[in-house]
Amino acid sequence: METVSITMVEDVAVLTIDNPPVNMGNATLRRDLYDALGAAGPDVVGVVIIGAGRHFYAGSDISEFDGPLIDPQLPAVIEVIESLPVPVVAAISGLALGGGLELALGCDGRIGATSARLGFPEVTLGILPGAGGTVRAARLLGVPTAIDLVASARQVDADEALELGLLDHVVPAEDLLARAVDLARSLAGKSRLRDRSVPHANPEQVEEAVARHARKARPNVLEAVGMVRRSAEVDAGLALSEERAIFERLRVSEEAANLRYLFFAKRAAAKALRGKVAPRPVRTVGIAGAGTMGAALARACSGAGYRVVLFDTNPAALARVAGAMPGLTTTETVGGLAGADLVVDAVFEDMDVKRDLFAEVERHVAPGAVLATNTSYLDINEMSRSLEYPRRFGGLHFFNPPDRNPLVELIRAETTDDVTAATLADVVKALGKTGIPAGVGDGFVANRVYADYRTQAEFLVEEGATPEQVDAAMVQLGLAIGPFAVADMSGLDIAWARRKRIAPTRDPLQRYVDIPDRLCEAGRLGRKTGAGWYGYPDGARRGLPDPDAVRIIEEARATKGIAARSIDDGEIRARILASMLCAAVQLMESGVAQRASDIDVALTEGFAFPRATGGPLRLLSRWEEDDVIAALTAAYRSCRVTFALAEPATRGELPQAVRAVLRQVAPHEMFERAASR
């Protein structure tokens, strides 16, 4: 089936792209567009390229980037457009992203429907625009604006695109084709962006644009910024050649491959959340609890267009939130939630508190209302047993701060029905969150893996490392903040409450580090109390090594007869990563996690594990097998109960369950190397 058709509107050839569902650019589409452009007859006075369906050209099929690109590549298609003797107009509706925007910039004119959204998302995938995006954008918009557009990866709507100059006109959707045909007829010959001079820019404005995007930017972003600047210094032909060379180099890099892996992993998770039944409509969201979590949830839901009703028995807490959110509806009684289509709890992490809350909420809301708990660790199956209609109950586990953290775990209780699950998934999508499915289990997915991360970090400190050394070693891996700084920021009392809750069921043979308990007992609950693993003098936001914390750590070691030893950064990272791997394998074996890639999504989205690595599992999948075995051996020896599944590693064997998980996330060449040895 051809993806491009040619029709004539009198003397203008209209090329319609039809590659559902979103007109994604792939080898077939490029070939058909290349051929169609070449078939435009000698009698035409202009050409219009338009998309069938909602979108113009949503971008390139990035699955093609893992192998050699098939000709004709996009620069060749754009070269044909520029070489035609007649004007070519891009008629843009919906998405024109990445290669789609580059295609439009290769045309002589651009007209957009009000639905148009344009942007360069390439830097989020470890690359840069590679079909003239940096070169033509600089010539159309000027260097400072082009830097912002390319380096930010943001999408602009039709109105902003018109204001910037990306679009020549914006028209109603029903007029798009006719107005594009008129524009093609009215243009006086070709108007190639590559032939234009780069608009003059004040050097200070250029430096300001560079500085905005240079801070903490990944190397590919810096290269994209540099290429925009370079395009103003050399002729277009050389700039296009240099841009393509950088694109090809970055495309085959490990970082770009990892980011593509995460792109498809998030897509797989989203697909798994989509049910086969229709969701219930949700217009009003009730939130129970006006503390930090509840206030942030209210902001997130309100920002997504939901009407929000916030319940709390504390009028002062309600007043604080309402003062920051004009128009918010508040209530001091559960009955005030009666009109909510969805009620989410943000109350204290206690089973009885949450169970009593939902039992009362259920008496007030409509029969079709959905109830969701935001618990981080509690058993939602047990929670559901107090409900009269448990089929409409499930879990939506948000991560702090929920108005900014993109991760949400959607947890189905044993009684959750398909309509409820579909409704919760629809809300996750509407909030713009990255959702993953999770089963019932202590900590669900992300917190369960992070618990073993934190556990191993505490083992390392008990053996001789300092908190600041462990944090620095993980920051060197690419994390923005280490585990002890995170604990201080979140509050040590949260994990302390969990440890006390599960203490009766803890295996007495399992290694237990009591240093965090000693810190909490001393009133060192983290940054909020001015002291935790670190000290925070005079309200400082960044912790400093604290002699009192050192004393508590040394006393704990002495009580157990542990002589501190020197531990290098490599051992720290290897043991922590191996511990996370063990937790991931247990999640897969128990069915709490559906896919290994969901775990990488959870850690990169929810806990800012460096995306450039693809996540902890993807990172380990690239290690040599002997190195994985050595790391698992060290983790096993740190606690033979917690990391029991790693025992085969002590005999030089990669546990089969570990191999199966790593195989799911690995580039194929890892196991090809292993098989060849």
Image: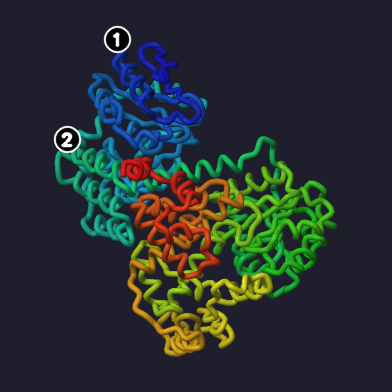
Q: Is residue 258 left or right of residue 439?
A: left
Residue at position x 47%, y 85% in the image: 557
Front residue of this view, candidates 119 and 596: 596
Q: Is residue 38 above or below residue 582?
A: above
Whether residue 276 is visible? yes
Q: Is residue 337 left or right of residue 676?
A: right
Q: Is the C terminus in the top left, top right, bottom left or bottom right quadrant?
A: top left
Place of residue 343 in the rendered image (x, y in percent of width and height, measured from the top left): 72, 56
Amino acid identity at mark 2 = Gly
Q: What kind of element bears circle 1?
A: loop
Place of residue 215 in the rendered image (x, y in percent of width and height, measured from the top left): 32, 62
Q: Would you say the residues marked 2 and 1 are in contact, meaning their CB atoms lie under 8 Å apart?
A: no
Tag shown at residue 237 = 2
Give the residue pinned by disc 1: 43
Front residue of this view, candidates 60 and 249: 249
Q: Is residue 317 above or below residue 184?
A: below
Residue at position x 50%, y 79% in the image: 527
Callout 2: 10 Å neighbours few (<14), some, many (20+)? few
Q: Is residue 170 above or below residue 35?
A: below
Q: What kind of element bears circle 2?
A: helix
Residue at position x 47%, y 80% in the image: 533
